[in-house]
Image (cartoon, helix red, strand yellow):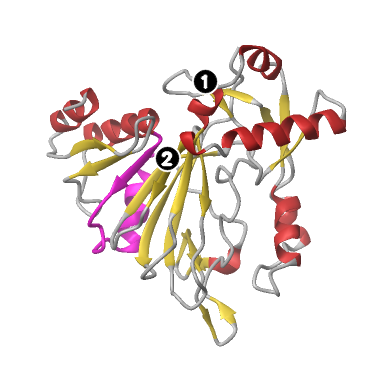
């Protein structure tokens, strides 16, 4: 049993941790999201999240949106997504991720996550983590890929690491959203002027220090990172393109095959993820909450 599993067992619970990948990701066994959890249990889970990056809670089909929200809130304040059209009725903390279209109207974000990204990295205080609950799954497809930004940084050449440490980069939601809306046949709304004002471009360190582990993180993604502040545009674009390709190497990835009732909690500080998609005739709906995180600090 791992040290973290031992900590968990001391937290008046019976759950254990089982690694899912050599680098990161673990399954938590024997924990019920719907049941009250004491501070020691929440602290143990927060520690496990920081060290493993992705936590998988099985057999949570019975969990209601209210219980999902309550468990998520134990780790910090929750964000309300800018795409207001796809928030769960009476529960704005929940974003609906779904490919289901009824009477020509999408139930949720149809094209959510079809690119590598860290949720809400485009905020001044990016997300600490996201909790995604499987509500309806397709008979095939629909996997989610997760990438370790810690492992991606560690694998870089030392000269590249030295070059990256003083750099900062722009993260921008509007650039991506406009591009997606243009090719979505009306399924993804363009943000109103007022909505767009709430998500202006922000600047974060290219190499971020994890607040819990102290590890350096390659905090860029093809989804939201648009340019390097300190470099000429062409040079910065080339550098980012190389970093994005580096992050896409399968050796850094854990592939999650969803099961009924899964709730997956991932660390947006240290991971990126990608929705692999499924056939449009196969229904897939999940509910997501997002925990607010701290302002990133540079690793030096």
Q: Is mark 2 on a helix, strand or loop?
A: loop
Residue 220 visible, this orientation: no
Residue most toward the front?
250
Q: Residue at x 56, y 59 (%)?
A: 112
Q: Residue at x 60, y 84 (%)?
A: 104
Residue 187 relative to residue 212: left or right:
right
Figure check: 300 above or below 278 = above
Q: Which residue is drawn at 23% across and 64% down?
A: 62
Figure check: 239 above or below 255 = above
The mark closer to the camera, 1 or 2, is: 1
- The percent position of residue 170, horizontal first and vertical second, equals 73, 36
* Quarter the N terminus occupies: top left
The residue under label 2 is 76
* 43 drawn magenta: no
Figure check: 290 above or below 249 = below
Dot 1: within a 10 Å radius of its alpha carbon, few (fewer than 14), some, or many (20 or more) residues?
some
Residue 138 relative to residue 247: left or right:
left
Q: Which residue is drawn at 34% across and 55% down?
A: 68
* Quarter the C terminus occupies: top right
Distance from disc 1 to disc 2, alpha carbons, whole Å, reads: 29 Å
The residue under label 1 is 154
Residue 101 visible, this orientation: yes
Dot 2: within a 10 Å radius of its alpha carbon, few (fewer than 14), some, or many (20 or more) residues?
some
- The percent position of residue 22, horizontal first and vertical second, equals 34, 31
Residue 258 relative to residue 175: left or right:
left
Magenta-drawn segment: 53-75
- The percent position of residue 234, horizontal first and vertical second, equals 86, 33
Q: Which mark is residue 188?
A: none
- The percent position of residue 255, horizontal first and vertical second, equals 41, 47
């Amino acid at each position: 049993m791992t040290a973290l599993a031992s900590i968990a067992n001391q937290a008046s619970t019976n759950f254990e941790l089982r690694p899912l990948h050599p680098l990161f990701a673990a399954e938590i066994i024997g924990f019920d999201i719907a049941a009250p959890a004491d501070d020691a249990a929440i602290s143990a889970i927060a520690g496990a999240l920081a060290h493993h990056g992705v936590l998988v809670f099985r057999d949570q089909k019975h969990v209601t949106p209210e219980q999902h929200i309550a468990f998520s809130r134990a780790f910090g304040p929750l964000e309300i997504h800018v795409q207001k059209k796809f928030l769960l009725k009476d529960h704005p903390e929940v974003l609906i991720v779904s490919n289901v279209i009824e009477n020509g109207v999408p139930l949720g974000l149809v094209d959510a996550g079809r690119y590598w990204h860290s949720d809400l990295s485009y905020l001044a205080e990016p997300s600490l983590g996201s909790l995604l609950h499987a509500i309806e799954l397709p008979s095939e497809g629909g996997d989610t890929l997760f990438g370790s930004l810690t492992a991606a940084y560690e694998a870089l050449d030392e000269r590249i690491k030295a070059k990256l440490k003083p750099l900062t980069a722009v993260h921008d939601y509007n650039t991506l959203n406009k591009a997606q809306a243009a090719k979505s046949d009306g399924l993804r709304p363009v943000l109103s002027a007022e909505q767009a004002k709430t998500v202006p471009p922000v600047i974060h360190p290219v190499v971020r220090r994890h607040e819990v582990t102290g590890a350096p993180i390659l905090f860029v993604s093809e989804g939201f990172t648009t340019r390097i502040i300190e470099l000429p545009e062409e040079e910065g674009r080339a550098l980012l393109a190389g970093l994005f390709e580096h992050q896409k190497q399968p050796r850094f990835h854990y592939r999650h095959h969803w099961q009924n009732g899964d709730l997956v909690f991932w660390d947006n500080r240290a991971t990126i993820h990608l929705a692999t998609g499924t056939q449009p005739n196969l229904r897939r709906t999940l509910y997501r909450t997002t925990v607010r995180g701290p302002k990133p600090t540079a690793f030096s």
